Image (cartoon, rainbow, N blue to C red):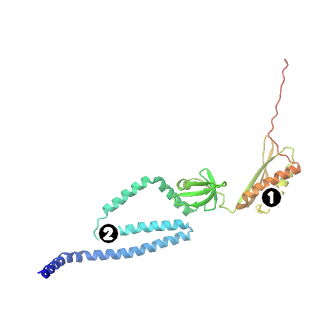
Amino acid sequence: MQDSTIETWLQETKANWLPLLVEHGSHILFALITLAIGWWLISRITNGLANFLQQRKADAMLTGFLSSLFSAMLRILLLLSVASMIGIQTTSFLALIGTAGLAVGLALQGSLANFAGGVLILFLRPFRAGDYIEAQGVGGTVESILIFHTLLRTADNKTIILPNGALSNGSITNYSRKPTRRVDINVGIDYGDDIKQARAILLGLAAADERVLKDPAAIVHLVSLGDNSVNLSLRMWTKSADFWGVFFSIQEQMKESFDREGISFPFPQRTVHISQQAE
């Protein structure tokens, strides 16, 4: 009796499910093939994107992040496509994902702007770690460039955190981008001093310093005639790394040389006329 019952159940099951398997089996098989091929193609595309970013010398952190993000998005789309192929309704899932994305985007508007700015900075590379920059009213050496913010170290060893959104949309002065920089040292001498003598002293100081480049050659200009002084400007080129060393050293030597040669630094003067009225 029991054997006949099992046999009857098997026959009913076969009669009910076999047509379904025949009807939907091809769809399931095609969906599995699509999933396997799509998974393989996504891996190839992701590797191609990573190689392209590496050839463009993009930051390693940016390369890994974009490759992972792109791969995750493509895999989600693939799974939704495969689900729709076997008859699963994906409209509600898409609507849910869109609503959640909109809510998250509104809640994280500032963070998303910083994220986009970080991607632009890491991809376009207006500066690199170790560069000295000025941006957003502050200046410092770039310590690290992260996805949401950039860390600067000031000359007195303070840490400044700049959001990448504002940083990527503002002006940036990069003092380390070029291998050389021009050093300008301005000085005022008395009207009674010899301009040619002062020029010769300044050019001699520049020529004696090995850090000052010979090409372009150093030059001294008379830039203005002030109220109390004749204003000269010594302009010379040096490597970017030697800028401050040359700037401070030449200024100190200039003061000593001018004192030794009798060239004076005038002080602001004012003439006062006193008139006395008879009582």
Question: Residue 38: percent from the left, percent from the top?
Answer: 39, 73
Percent position of residue 199, x then y: 83, 53
Question: Which residue is found at the position 74% from the left and 56% from the top?
Answer: 183
- Whether residue 228 is situated above or below residue 163 in the rendered picture: above
Q: Position of residue 34 (x, y in %)?
A: 35, 74
Q: What number is the disc on residue 206?
A: 1
Q: Give the amino acid at mark 1.
A: Ala
Horizontal relation, residue 257 to residue 109: left or right: right
Q: Is residue 127 left or right of residue 263?
A: left
Packing grade of label 1 (10 A; few <14, some 14-19, many >=20) is many
**Image quadrant assignment for residue 174:** bottom right
Label 2 is placed on what type of residue? Answer: Ala
Q: Quadrant of the N terminus?
A: bottom left
In the rendered image, the quadrant that contains the C terminus is top right
Q: Which mark is residue 53?
A: none
- Residue at mark 2: 83
